[in-house]
Image (cartoon, rainbow, N blue to C red):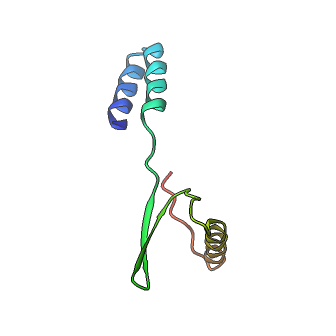
Amino acid sequence: NGAVYSLLCNIYAACERWEDLREMRRKMDIATKKTPGCSLIEVNGVAHEFVSGDKSHLQSEEIYMKLEEIAQESTFAGCLPYTPE
């Protein structure tokens, strides 16, 4: 669990245990992998699932080009994406 690793890192830093902190960060990088985002859309009664970064769909190139076009048009219209990072 990423929260546990983060808590331990904070404790090690507060206690100035730098070597333990480095080791915990290394373990954290190995153990915690971010789950890709997933969306589902229904078109003409057929459900289509999209996973962030997936390029296995036969038309993925066209799909990503269309998404880029939509993003550019949205930005031009004054809409900005929500990026919590």
46 or 82, which lies in front? 46
The quarter of the displayed image where residue 49 is located: bottom left
Compared with residue 81, is residue 29 higher up or lower down, i.e. above or below? Answer: above
66 or 12, which lies in front? 66
Compared with residue 9, is residue 73 higher up or lower down, i.e. above or below? Answer: below
Counting every numbered tag in the picture gives 0
- Asked whether, in this view, residue 41 is left or right of residue 72, the answer is left
| Residue 2 image point, x, y percent | 37, 37
Residue pictured at 37% horizontal, 30% vertical: 5
Q: In which quarter of the image is the N terminus?
A: top left
Q: Which residue lies furthest to the front in this view?
A: 58
| Residue 31 image point, x, y percent | 42, 32
| Residue 7 image point, x, y percent | 34, 30
Compared with residue 39, is residue 70 higher up or lower down, i.e. above or below? Answer: below
The quarter of the displayed image where residue 67 is located: bottom right
Residue pictured at 40% horizontal, 26% vertical: 9
- Asked whether, in this view, residue 15 is left or right of residue 81, the answer is left
Compared with residue 54, is residue 43 higher up or lower down, i.e. above or below? Answer: below
Q: Residue furthest bottom?
A: 44
15 or 58, which lies in front? 58
- Asked whether, in this view, residue 70 is left or right of residue 16, the answer is right
| Residue 43 image point, x, y percent | 45, 82
The quarter of the displayed image where residue 16 is located: top left
